[in-house]
Amino acid sequence: MTLDNPVFATFAISAALMVIKLMGQGWITVYRMMKIRSGFASPEDAKAGPFNPDPKPGQTDYNDYVDRSRRMHRNDIENIPAFLAIGLLFVFVAPPLILAQLLMYGFVVARILHTLAYATAQSHEVRSVPYTVGSLIVIYMAVHVLVVAIATHGPL
Amino acid sequence: MTLDNPVFATFAISAALMVIKLMGQGWITVYRMMKIRSGFASPEDAKAGPFNPDPKPGQTDYNDYVDRSRRMHRNDIENIPAFLAIGLLFVFVAPPLILAQLLMYGFVVARILHTLAYATAQSHEVRSVPYTVGSLIVIYMAVHVLVVAIATHGPL
Amino acid sequence: MTLDNPVFATFAISAALMVIKLMGQGWITVYRMMKIRSGFASPEDAKAGPFNPDPKPGQTDYNDYVDRSRRMHRNDIENIPAFLAIGLLFVFVAPPLILAQLLMYGFVVARILHTLAYATAQSHEVRSVPYTVGSLIVIYMAVHVLVVAIATHGPL
């Protein structure tokens, strides 16, 4: 478990990219809220202040432009932390490098494509493809870890 | 930190099962949305397409059957990533195997029972029991790690 | 990667504190729901039972006192799991102890201040300061890990 191990380095690169993506989505929500000065989450956000010099009614109402970024964020937090955990455990089962690269970089690409599809309001069908790819990669890695761990250790 | 260490193997098995559970909840939401063709999250999901050949009004309205799966998912993401992180750190404090098995497999069982209680709309009182067990297990592991880390290293 | 390594111990202490914070937010939501007997998430929660001996209409309606705790929880799950994952990987790049302490304890302090600002409904401007500090710490650690991993291993 050092960066000299290419499987671990593949995981570290993928994980760092996914953490940046996850945190970036929060800033996209902030950017969208500030741009249209609406979609605020809390009553106090609609008060006058440097971020909101000229309050107007309805600033805390639902707004699809802002909520879309929150939905994308929610989809990230439903998928990325699971990848971060199982990706690390996957390194411990010492998979072939090419398999680790395919799965981990595949997950990163799938999540970027999902973000693009969601941000541009592509159809449910289009958005579902990268979602499915990312989800199946995480599930595959979990089943692989489970099988190897049980084979090594026994079920209990 | 290898799968030959039974405490680590216990964590790997528990973590893989919880990742599969977490990802599976997303697919249950998809299944429920497709089954009743309602509870969609985004305006574009209500457009005609292979997943929605015959659109009807109100497909993006709140629907308890679908939203229940999203609430279960939210409860998962509030609990499972914390378990995945603290469970790994708990392996580093080298606990007795029986304690690790009790806590980690206990968490897995508690979260499965919570899922069943939530899916079948059991009373708040019933659902709260597995929630509490799972939450206290995570808190116990965190306090244990904190105490050992401070005892080993000092507070700063 | 043992607790004798002060950088790893710093991470273990920070991670344990953040897990306790994250789980504690769930209990604050429970406390608030029970205190005002409102803001319940599911229809079955409004039925009579030991937790709700005297049901009244509107117990599942939106309630800011309860929902504020859920928003704080959501903000936690958008930030803390990413910290837990990248903090562990940051230990592997062997940073100077003082840098690890600054970033990791800085994150803990920032999230505690964010919680206090949110709980007391401080202005958007005040709340944004600890949010920004915590977010930038996670992003910095991710970029640092990414650069070292690519420098050690190459991009693919």
Image (tube, coloured by chain):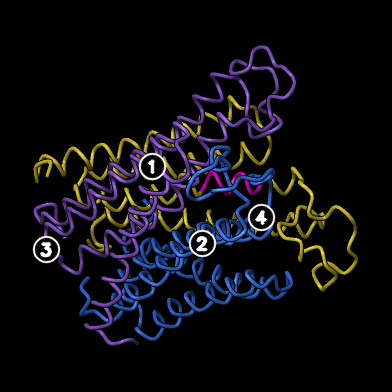
Chain colours: A blue, B yellow, C purple
Amino acid type, label 4: Ile
Q: Residues within 10 Å of mark 4 (few under 14, many from 20)?
A: some
Distance between the alpha carbons at the discs numbered 2 and 3: 32 Å
Q: Which residue is mark 2?
A: A79
User: Real-space Cα distance between discs 2 and 4?
Assistant: 14 Å
Give the residue pinned by disc 1. Answer: C114
| B44, above or below B58, in the image | below
| Nearest to the observer: residue A18 or residue A51 | A51
Return the x and y of residue A110 as percentages of the image width and height.
Answer: 54, 76
Callout 2: few (<14), some (14-19), or many (20+) C-alpha neighbours within 10 Å?
many
Question: Which dot marks residue C51?
Answer: none
Q: On what subunit does the disc labeled 3 rest?
A: C
The image quarter containing residue C92 is bottom left
Q: Are marks 1 and 2 in contact (CB under 8 Å)?
A: no
The label shown at residue B28 is: 4
Q: Residue at x 60, y 54 (%)?
A: A37
The secondary structure type at the circle numbered 3 is loop
Kindly identify which residue carries mark 3: C96
Residues tagged by mark 1 and mark 4 found on one chain of the structure = no
Q: Mark 2 falls within which chain?
A: A
For the residues labelled 1 and 3, the Cα–Cα distance comes to 27 Å
Q: Position of residue C134 (x, y in %)?
A: 34, 53
What residue is shown at x 69% (from left), y 46% (from top)? Answer: B67
Circles 3 and 4 in contact, beta carbons < 8 Å: no
